[in-house]
Amino acid sequence: SQQGEEDPQALSIQEGENATMNCSYKTSINNLQWYRQNSGRGLVHLILIRSNEREKHSGRLRVTLDTSKKSSSLLITASRAADTASYFCATDGYSSYKLIFGSGTRLLVRP
Amino acid sequence: DADVTQTPRNRITKTGKRIMLECSQTKGHDRMYWYRQDPGLGLRLIYYSFDVKDINKGEISDGYSVSRQAQAKFSLSLESAIPNQTALYFCATSAGTGEAGELFFGEGSRLTVL
């Protein structure tokens, strides 16, 4: 079964708008990571947030983590057409060193 | 050259055939992984290896086997391929640390079993 589940499954926005994706998970974690996948390509790491962190930024990306709710969100600000991709969260489970991925959010940014 | 290289990139085969997907990396990482991606199901972990002598089953290992020939090489085999193994397969690596670190992915091997 999936450890992380993203919401929504698909999101369509206009260029320049912000995009927010959410991830819920089931067990305690050491860290949670977000990845991006362009159609049919390999996944690319975006950001890692540890269980003792609440918020992290990287360029136009902002990730939050609420361990009490077992949830995370990824915000992409001022979106661009090039941000069109699928976005996945991945969690490690507290006592394992392997990542389990959610089913992803497909983001379409319309020019 | 890519840090994580998968071969073949595309393969069409028939039911019952033996298939090997190969992965090699130049990142010097100890940890290597094989994931499978199906539409709408995200990535599922098949096998992982934390060093040459360490092999572990993931979520969906049935019907698959792996070999860690060297630190840089990790192969996935389908002994007798079946149509529901049609999927996109990814190899990934990570540095060995005290946590599940950033994964570096190959470009994927698209397998079709007829």
Image (tube, coloured by chain):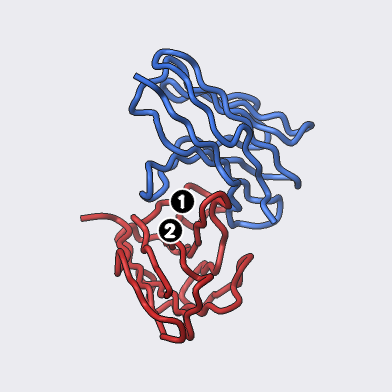
Chain colours: A blue, B red
- Residue situated furthest right in the rendering: A68
Label 2: chain letter: B
- For label 2, the SS is strand
For this view, does A91 lie left or right of residue B48?
right
B24 or B65, which lies in front?
A: B65
Is mark 1 in CB contact (under 8 Å) with mark 2? Answer: yes
The residue singled out by tag 1 in the image is: B103
Q: Which residue is drawn at 58% across and 35% down?
A: A49
Q: Residue A6: which numbered mark, if any?
A: none
Place of residue A39 in the rendered image (x, y in percent of width and height, measured from the top left): 38, 44
Q: Which residue lies at the image location 44% right of the left edge and 79% below the top edge? A: B77
Q: Residue B93 shows which numbered tag?
A: 2
Q: Which residue is drawn at 33% across and 57% down?
A: B27
Amino acid at the residue labelled 1: Leu
Residue A18 drawn at (x, y percent)? 49, 16
In this rendering, the count of numbered labels is 2
Secondary structure type for disc 1 = loop
**Residue B31, above or below B76:** above
Numbered disc 1: what chain?
Answer: B
Identify whether B71 is placed above or below A7. below
Amino acid, disc 2: Thr
For the N terminus of chain B, give its image quadrant.
bottom left
Question: Badge 2: how crowded within 10 Å, few (<14), some, or many (20+)?
Answer: many
Give the quadrant of the C terminus of chain B. bottom left
Task: Report the residue at 47% width, 20% height from top.
Answer: A13
Q: Where is residue A50 in the image (x, y as percent from the top left)?
A: 62, 37
Q: With B21 as the anchor, is A5 left or right in this view?
A: right
Question: Is the same chain shared between marks 1 and 2?
Answer: yes
Toward the left, the furthest residue is B1
